[in-house]
Image (cartoon, helix red, strand yellow):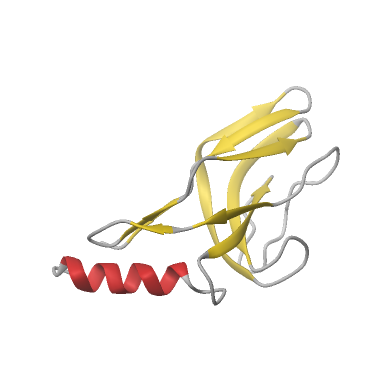
């Protein structure tokens, strides 16, 4: 069942926004489904998680500014949300559609969003 009241959807979205206690989270890239613990995170080259800040929309939506990752060659199919730049608590995942393949090291741009329906 979808949530009919836009204000209620936004309250739920804003709760998601502060899973880490603040609106800032660390976003990761993954070479496969990270499951519920954040496995298959990208590694190598100058790859590192990128910090992003959720901003509230309306009616149950959140967004972030575009994030740029330095990534090694390979295929990347998921993004993840974490509490810290390294280690930390894994919060959630999202499939990249379509997945992204780099033939050599380069950059990947991702614009995270979240919506409650």
Residue 32 in the figure: left or right of residue 115: right
Give the position of the C terminus as an image quadrant.
bottom left
Q: Is residue 46 left or right of residue 88?
A: right
**In this view of the protein, can residue 21 be seen by the observer?**
yes
User: On screen, 46 above or below 12?
Assistant: above
Tell me residue 7's x, y (percent): 19, 70
Whether residue 1 is visible = no
Q: Residue at x 78, y 23 (%)?
A: 104
Residue at the outermost right position: 45
Quadrant of the rendering where the N terminus is positioned: bottom left
Residue 108: percent from left, percent from top: 63, 33
**Residue found at the far top of this picture:** 103
Q: Nearer the viewer, residue 65 or 31?
A: 65
Which quadrant holds residue 61? bottom left
Q: Residue at x 56, y 63 (%)?
A: 24
> Residue 39 is drawn in which quadrant?
bottom right
Q: Which residue sits at x=49%, y=42%? A: 111
Residue sticking out furthest to the left: 4
How many tags in the picture? 0
Decide if residue 88 is on the left or right side of residue 54: right
User: Where 62 sits versus 87, above or below?
Assistant: above
Residue pictured at 37% horizontal, 70% vertical: 14
Q: Is residue 19 left or right of residue 10?
A: right
């Amino acid at each position: 069942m979808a949530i009919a009241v836009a204000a209620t959807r936004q309250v739920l979205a804003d709760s998601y926004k502060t899973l880490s206690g603040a609106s800032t989270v660390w976003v990761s890239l993954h070479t496969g489904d990270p499951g519920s613990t954040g496995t298959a995170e990208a590694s190598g080259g100058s790859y590192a998680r990128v910090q992003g800040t959720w901003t509230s929309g309306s009616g149950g939506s959140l967004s972030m500014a575009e994030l740029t990752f330095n990534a090694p060659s390979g295929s990347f199919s998921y993004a993840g949300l974490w509490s810290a730049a390294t280690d930390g608590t894994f919060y959630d995942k999202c499939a990249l559609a379509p997945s992204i393949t780099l033939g050599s090291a380069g950059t990947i741009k991702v614009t995270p969003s979240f919506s409650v329906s």
